[in-house]
Image (tube, rainbow, N blue to C red):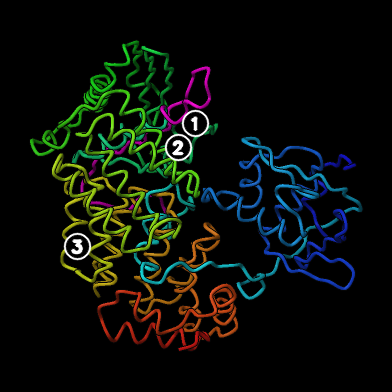
Amino acid sequence: MPTTRDPETFSRLDAPFAVGEWEVHARSNEIRRGTRRIKLEPKVMQVLCFLAARPGTVVSREELEAEAWPGMVVTYDAVTSAIIKLRKALGDEARHPRYIETLSKSGYRLIAEVRGGVQDPPDLPAGRAARAPWPIALRSLAAFVVLSLIAVWLLPNGSDPTVSDGGGTVPTSGHIPGIAVLPFVNLGAVPEQDYFADGITEDLITDLSKLSGLWVVARNSAFAYRGGTESEPAIARELGVDYVLKGSLQRSADRIRINVRLVDGLRGSNLWAERYDRQIDDLFALQDEIAASILSAIEVEIAPSDRARLGRSHLASIEAYDAFLRGLDHYGRRSHQDTQMAIDHYRRAIAIDPEFARAYAGLALVYVRDAVDGWDLGAEDGLAKAEELIARARALDRMIPQVYFVQGQIDLYRRNYGAAIRSAEEAISIKPNYADAHALLAWILHFAGRADDGLVSMERAVRLNPRVPAIYRLVRGALHYENGDIDRALADFEAAVDMSPSFQLSRVWLAAAYAAADRPGDAEWETREILALDPGFSVSHVRRAFPIRDPIYRERFLDDLRRAGLPD
């Protein structure tokens, strides 16, 4: 049976210790059994050591994230990926575990015996060349480059709380007030109602984001503070905003109770607070009332064009809206099962209310990502379904920005650069604070050969989403790489890989950037990562799949990949 140990002893790793049949050498990131040696990634080793310090104890996903990725908000699959790699190395099985047990909705528990001790902290290997190979399952090349972004862009992505220019915001001319809407707390007796509280929060962020006279922190950065203990002034300083909105929600069968508090980010004092107790059927009117009260409290003027954006063209039934929020929740969990459940909930919302345009747009996003992940549809089939759905959504409501976001991705994939740019700009015109649309525009401009313009768009995206998701790192790194600024490109690519371990696209650019930086060892290591699970991946595939317009840039990119060891 496992023995209880002081967790602090495992934070200082020097002497080997044993877990079950394996000897663990943290300093060299190796596990050994007899003559067999297996190299682990540093992050995977950290997870193993953290579990080994607590044998027999359930360790939550959040605890593992805090230990292995301190100060970062990582993708949902970061811990899962580390556990999968750890089980594979140990020869363990999830269904019949001998080493690591998964407890649904609770976390993980090391059930193998732990023996031996540890002393001083190891000097972890420096640089990329010291890391163990990380499996990369490259998807269908037809949609590999462009569409894989959709699979990451609209999710809670892996993020880094720092920004390379030294702050959480990008300077702008004149002062536009900023606000962060933190995730509402579900006070209901049913924890499964968290999706509803999250959906209400996201809708409020979306409504406020349509205003040109206010800048609103993106969902990804705001939701990073879920369950945190930071004070409102601390959060305001980190995000560079003037105001912080906090709230709680309790839903019963036919009623909803919401408490909302708007805090001055500088002083920490309440500017406005209200408690609402309404019939559930009044939910949409209540959302509008809360948004109006916020704008009144911070004295934001609403331009005529903003009023048009704020109007609701269609009020869905509460039953359809509930199904829509369930679909949104499952969409964000990113697994095969959750994707199918998202499709089912969106379809149910449409069946209940065939005029509910947002449900069509949500379903279009799922189908595009589904094509990327290759679970049920080919890339072209997924694109065709997505186009059909967004056409229906546009016919019902032309003011849904996600419609143009998806269209921009499809246009880029088909190398219609002008149309792709116009689609991204249309999404921004509807929702000026749409951080992901600004990042999408930067990505399109990168492929269109307009790197300098793309960097300007990325500055806007980072200002709105200051915890800088991994996907933004990739886009900004590609823009720097296109401009020949290899040092900055490498910083972004490496951060993207660290924040989102399964984010395969960034590794292709990272290999090219290493070659450009005359670091052949690192470049060849990244290429081995690619070829390990996809032996057929080649330069010719990249030429076909990556929609790079400028032939000079395209050939430089391909030459760097050849120098990295990627076969023709």
Of residues 376 and 476, the one nearer the viewer is 376
- Counting residues from the start of the chain, the first of labels 3 and 2 encountered is 2
Q: For the point 24% across and 27% down, which residue is it?
A: 316
- Total labels drawn: 3
**Residue receiving disc 1:** 231
Question: Local crowd at mark 1 within 10 Å, few (<14), some, or many (≥20)?
Answer: few
Question: Local crowd at mark 3 within 10 Å, few (<14), some, or many (≥20)?
Answer: many
Q: Main secondary structure of the magenta part?
A: loop
**Residue 359's x, y, as percent?**
28, 38
**Residue 57's x, y, as percent?**
77, 37
Residue 235 has which mark? 2
**Mark 1 to mark 3: distance in Å?**
40 Å
| SS class, disc 3 | helix
Give, as a single range, the part of the protein colored magenta: 167-196
1 and 3 marks in contact (CB < 8 Å):
no
**Mark 1 to mark 2: distance in Å?**
6 Å
**Residue receiving disc 3:** 421
Question: Local crowd at mark 2 within 10 Å, few (<14), some, or many (≥20)?
Answer: many
Q: Eyeballing the image, is 453 above or below 435?
A: below
Q: Amino acid at mark 3?
A: Ile
